[in-house]
Image: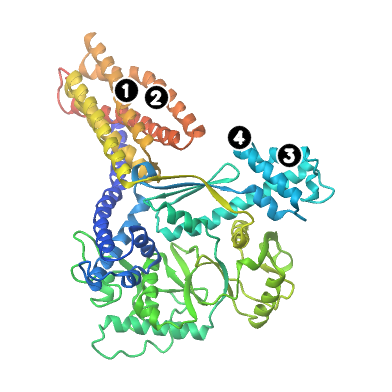
């Protein structure tokens, strides 16, 4: 084999191998989702829960508790038999969650789900931020609202026009007396954009309640938000949960002594479960500070091997779905025998932390009925909302906090990002302002808890946990310790989101049923197969053995396209399927040009080897020109098009690049291999 072909062969093998490896999770996920549907059907049929409720409880880690509370007697299975399905679904869901980020994502038109477009109510926003609002302002805003509803015009242009018609100066209600109308409009635009950013943060937290693995929440224009919930058909519930105000709470961290007692109690419950209650169980270690600051000796072990047959985590007999593998956790074996719960945890700067791989397992433990009954009524475990990376491992911090909040986000009037001074010079800090009532509450709380930490909790997840350094009577406080300016901005948005300055309203909603999505998949698949079959038949009939080589390259082309979609986490939509169908027709175009050039060279009397060299060499420029112009068109469509157009352009772009590679490189390698290994006097073309 020639040297240049050796390099091409190695590259080709690497590309094909990568494609197969990347596509493997997609094939596994399809099988796992089919098995999961059986579990969903079983649970739905024996409880009052809907599939959406099951998914939400599964995501929250309290599915078993929900099933026990909502089991319906007389539907066929006992509660213990349904719990077996719960255990099987949890095991399977952990594998699904592991494979989903690595698989091809399907859009709403293929999977079904809910599509919502929200718009910030700008007239209400202006009414909320206005100074000395009166009837005249109400009437002006009503006129503005009516005009923008009647025709598609810019809100702020209409604002200036109406105020001019009514002979009202903007600085009467907004900004300072010295501000011009243009300056005030700029300020109000920023206020509107800020409201959208706050709403985005709220929605991202709210969407977690659905258990949707790949929700899409994007900003559209200056005042709209698009929410796509794949797999969720209950649009009423989606609107209900998304539309509620964010629950921002300030909860004090429990005392270390309480945390130590609680950890000991969780360890004791787990040891009792592991022992199946057959024998007396000694108290779990004398000290569950037990998540000590030392190097963990982690071992990855299956849950069944670690926790035995009677654990609150194990998969009970008969629930093991065929072909499903045991889930695994990272366990510190040095402390597991004495403190099994601590073995799942780590110490991060004095805080309790959970390796990312163990998060779902730990959530299930702390939400299990056995552990919940053992916990004190006034305390609860909460996870930090983002992971911290230490070396190659990621950890989520876990805190025990007092369940009753000291106060809520309704007492926060504003929060801004500033650059610190003195000890915090050059670092981003968040300045928080409270209402009059909030200042009184904050003064009392900070005075009674100097030296302790207060968790800022948004919808059940801790977003920050600052230390109280002194009593703060002024109603103004600074939160320090931000890693960077972006983290400070996010926290400020969360604090301001406690009381949104403007409501949001649904201006568009669509629900794509799963049957419609399945019909789209079926029709799209049939279209791809039909187009593929026609091209394959034509190539074999017209170009004979050479046509078979082109068809093999076409098959690899499809594999590479799907692998790129999976590898770069792109979303496959119905227009994307159309792009793939078009690619199939175009994919053999390069080979047609090459084969026709080879035929011409053979008719001129050249040898097979010389004809192949000339065919590929002389057709290359034409192929390159044709594909580059098409690629440029696809890139323009992707850059300036909307959702469906972008989906079509994406698959078309990938297909063009993949087809050039398979048609020019792969087929050339095959031709060279046969002509080098054997004496070919006549080419089947």
What label does residue 627 carry, if any? 2
Give the alpha-carbon distance from disc 1 to disc 4, as whole Å: 50 Å
Mark 3 neighbour class, 10 Å CA radius: few under 14, some 14 to 19, many 20 or more: some
Residue that extends furthest to the top in the rendered view of this protein = 604
Q: Earlier in the sequence, mark 4 or mark 3?
A: 4
Marks 2 and 1 close (CB-CB < 8 Å): yes
Tell me, what colour scheme is on the image?
rainbow
Query: Marks 2 and 4: which is nearer the front?
Result: 4
Give the alpha-carbon distance from disc 2 to disc 1, as whole Å: 9 Å
What label does residue 151 carry, if any? 4
Residue 132 placed where, x, y %? 77, 56
Residue designated by label 1: 590
| Label 4: which secondary element | loop
- 496 left or right of 175 in image: left
Marks 3 and 2 close (CB-CB < 8 Å): no
What label does residue 162 carry, if any? 3
């Amino acid at each position: 084999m020639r040297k240049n072909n050796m390099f091409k062969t190695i590259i080709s093998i690497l590309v094909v191998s990568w494609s197969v490896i990347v596509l493997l999770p997609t094939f596994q996920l399809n099988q796992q989702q089919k098995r999961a549907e059986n579990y969903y059907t079983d649970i739905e049929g024996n409880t009052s829960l809907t599939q959406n409720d099951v998914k939400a409880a599964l995501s929250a880690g309290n599915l078993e508790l929900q099933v026990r509370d909502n089991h319906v007697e007389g539907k066929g299975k006992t509660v213990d038999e349904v719990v077996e399905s719960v255990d099987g679904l949890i095991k399977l869901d952990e594998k699904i969650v592991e494979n989903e980020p690595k698989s091809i994502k399907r859009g709403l038109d293929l999977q079904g789900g809910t599509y919502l477009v929200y718009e910030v109510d700008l007239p209400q926003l202006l009414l909320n931020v206005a100074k000395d609002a009166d009837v005249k302002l109400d009437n002006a805003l009503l006129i503005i609202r009516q005009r923008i509803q009647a025709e598609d015009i810019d809100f702020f242009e209409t604002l200036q026009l109406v105020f001019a018609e009514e002979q009202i100066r903007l600085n009467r209600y907004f900004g300072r007396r010295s501000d011009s109308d243009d300056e005030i409009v700029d300020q109000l635009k920023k206020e509107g954009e800020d409201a959208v950013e706050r709403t985005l943060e709220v929605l991202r937290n709210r969407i977690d309640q659905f258990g949707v693995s790949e929700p899409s929440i994007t900003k559209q224009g200056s005042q709209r938000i698009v929410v796509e919930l794949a797999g969720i058909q209950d649009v009423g519930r989606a609107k209900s949960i998304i539309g509620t105000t964010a629950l921002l709470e300030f909860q004090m961290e429990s005392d270390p002594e309480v945390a130590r007692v609680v950890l000991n109690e969780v360890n004791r419950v787990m040891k009792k479960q592991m022992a199946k209650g057959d024998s007396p169980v000694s108290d779990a270690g004398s000290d569950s500070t037990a998540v000590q600051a030392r190097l963990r000796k982690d071992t990855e072990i299956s849950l069944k091997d670690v926790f035995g047959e009677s654990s609150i985590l194990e998969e009970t007999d008969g629930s093991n779905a065929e072909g499903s593998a045991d889930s695994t956790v990272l366990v510190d074996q040095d402390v597991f025998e004495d403190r099994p719960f601590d073995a799942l945890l780590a110490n991060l700067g004095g805080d309790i932390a959970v390796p990312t791989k163990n998060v779902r397992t730990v959530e299930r433990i702390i939400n299990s009925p056995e552990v919940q009954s053992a916990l004190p009524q006034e305390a609860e475990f909460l996870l930090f909302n983002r992971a911290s990376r230490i070396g190659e491992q990621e950890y989520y911090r876990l805190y025990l906090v007092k369940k009753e909040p000291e106060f809520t986000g309704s007492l926060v009037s504003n929060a801004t990002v500033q650059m610190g001074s003195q000890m915090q010079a050059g670092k981003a800090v968040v300045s928080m302002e409270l209402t009059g009532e909030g200042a009184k509450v904050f003064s009392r709380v900070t005075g009674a808890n100097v030296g302790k930490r207060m968790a800022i909790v948004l919808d059940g997840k801790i977003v920050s946990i600052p230390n109280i350094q002194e009593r703060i009577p002024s109603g103004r406080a600074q939160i320090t310790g931000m890693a960077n300016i972006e983290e400070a901005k996010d926290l400020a948005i969360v604090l301001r989101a406690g009381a949104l300055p403007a409501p949001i309203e649904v201006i568009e909603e669509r629900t794509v049923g799963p049957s419609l999505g399945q019909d789209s998949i079926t029709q799209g698949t049939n279209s791809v197969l039909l187009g593929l079959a026609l091209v394959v038949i034509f190539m074999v009939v017209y170009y004979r053995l050479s046509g078979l080589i082109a068809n093999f390259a076409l098959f690899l082309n499809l594999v590479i396209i799907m692998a790129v979609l999976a590898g770069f986490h792109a979303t496959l939509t119905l227009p994307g399927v159309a792009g793939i169908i078009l690619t199939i027709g175009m994919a053999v175009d390069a080979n047609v040009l090459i084969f026709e050039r080879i035929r011409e060279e053979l008719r001129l009397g050249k040898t097979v080897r010389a004809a192949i060299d000339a065919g590929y060499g002389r057709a290359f420029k034409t192929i390159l020109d044709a594909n580059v112009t098409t690629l440029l068109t696809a890139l323009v469509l992707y850059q300036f098009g909307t959702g469906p157009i972008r989906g079509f352009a994406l698959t078309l772009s990938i297909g063009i690049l993949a087809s050039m590679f398979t048609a020019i490189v792969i087929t050339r390698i095959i031709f060279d291999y046969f002509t080098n290994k054997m004496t070919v006097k006549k080419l089947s073309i």
